[in-house]
Image: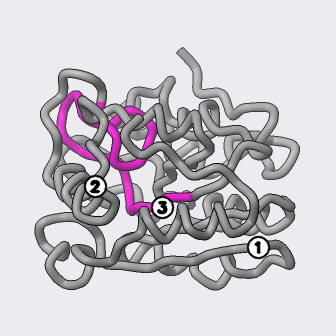
Amino acid sequence: MEIGFPTAWARLVPDPFAGDSELQKKVAEAYAAGTVYPPRERVFSAFSLTPPEAVRVVILGQDPYHEEGQANGLAFSVGDGVPLPPSLRNIFRELREDVGAQPPAGGDLSGWAKQGVLLLNAVLTVNAGAANSHANFGWQEFTDRVAASLGDLPQPIAFVLWGAQAQKKAAVAAASPYPRLVLSAPHPSPLSAYRGFFGSRPFSQINAFLEAHGEAPIRWQA
């Protein structure tokens, strides 16, 4: 199955694979040469599930999970029945401690995506077993353009930037005349979660921001 960039997003951001781009060539070569995650048809799942007009929250991570069966195109999410990766376990721990919400039954975060939470990584593909292996493909430039395009949307949007790669987008995320909240914290991985991720309370801050601007809160247990 071919990778398709959703039309609704293509009105705001040029299709990163249009015109035989260098990014498209590098990604195609990587899939041809070995195992790449997520599956080819799920590279743009975050955009498919959360169209621009629905975006209320952007949770930005680094790159997809690189172990078999984990990455599904939504940052930090895994499919039902897949054991929770350590980063997601830490996210759910912070969720419970922040707002007392029971996390989703499994690791599938599509319920968040359907409420307007764009679960986006700074880099959208990765080689199996090799974290950040596609960091130089050109994905960062594309996701910079995505973040910039969101500045033109009139609805209130909260940005949650987890980790150094995501935090590089802080300035572009804040650059908008419309209501914006930008929260930064260390990545929720076990290597950095105790350096300020735990106790950062992003979920309550997001909902307080949304409600202050007349928006319904996110049902985090969904």
Q: Is residue 22 magenta?
A: no
Q: Along the horizontal axis of the image, is 8 left or right of 40?
A: right
- In the figure, residue 83 lies in which quadrant? top left
**Lower position in the chain sequence, tag 2 or tag 1:** 2
Q: Which structural element holds mark 1?
A: loop
Query: In percent of the image, x 26 and y 75: which residue is there?
Result: 197
For disc 1, the neighbor class at 10 Å (few under 14, some 14 to 19, many from 20) is some
Q: Earlier in the sequence, mark 3 or mark 2?
A: 3
- Amino acid type shown at disc 3: Leu
Residue located beneath label 3 in the image = 60
Q: Is residue 63 magenta?
A: yes
Q: Which residues are magenta?
A: 58-78
- Answer left or right for 155 relative to 192: right
Location of mark 1 (residue): 179
Which of the numbered marks, if any, corresponds to residue 100? 2
Q: CA distance from mark 2 to mark 1?
A: 26 Å
